[in-house]
Amino acid sequence: MNKKITIKKATIVDNKLLLLTDESISGLLPSEQILVDSKLFSFVYLMENPEGYTYIDIPEPFWPLLKSTYGEQTPVFIQSQEEEVELSNFYEELAYVINNIRGNSNYGKDMVAKVEEHF
């Protein structure tokens, strides 16, 4: 069964970008893929679990922080109360998605405008 976790807060600590959630991330493994939710204006990092996928939803309010860490390739982690997991291949996937969205009306004009504005 697939599950969705929406990031509630993000911060930089000890040269790591931490995407914070109150939900359990136990047993989740990075799939090294980023998708797009152009209706909710978010990037979605896929993580695998024994039952399927968990979608880590990173809404637009966190994009400026992503942009600020993008150039330095600051390691990105999802963190819950009990653990943290590195989101491997994050910036490579983000770059691919951003380049694919720019000027591409298949994502919808609002999503294209927001990505172009931030990145």
Image (cartoon, grey):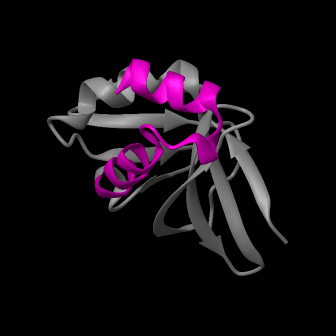
Q: How many numbered marks are there?
A: 0
Residue 8 percent across, percent down from the top left: 63, 27
Residue 51 percent across, percent down from the top left: 78, 79
The quadrant in which the C terminus is found is top left
Residue situated furthest left in the rendering:
72
The quarter holding residue 66 reads top left
Instruction: Depth check: give the residue in front, 63 or 53.
Output: 63
Most common secondary structure along the magenta stretch: helix
User: Range of the magenta residues?
Assistant: 92-119
Instruction: Depth check: give the residue in front, 66 or 21.
Output: 66
Instruction: Depth check: give the residue in front, 16 or 35.
Output: 35
Residue 84 percent across, percent down from the top left: 47, 51
The quadrant in which the N terminus is found is bottom right
Residue 103 percent across, percent down from the top left: 44, 37
Residue 11 visible: no
Instruction: Depth check: give the residue in front, 43 or 7.
Output: 43
Q: Name the residue rendered at 61%, 72% in the picture.
A: 48
The quarter holding residue 49 reads bottom right
Q: Name the residue rendered at 42%, 51% in the picture.
A: 100
Q: Name the residue rendered at 47%, 44% in the picture.
A: 101
Above or below, 60 against 37 in this view is: above
Whether 103 is among the magenta residues is yes
Above or below, 117 against 105 in this view is: above
Q: Name the residue rendered at 37%, 57% in the picture.
A: 93
Side (left or right) of 75 relative to 26: left
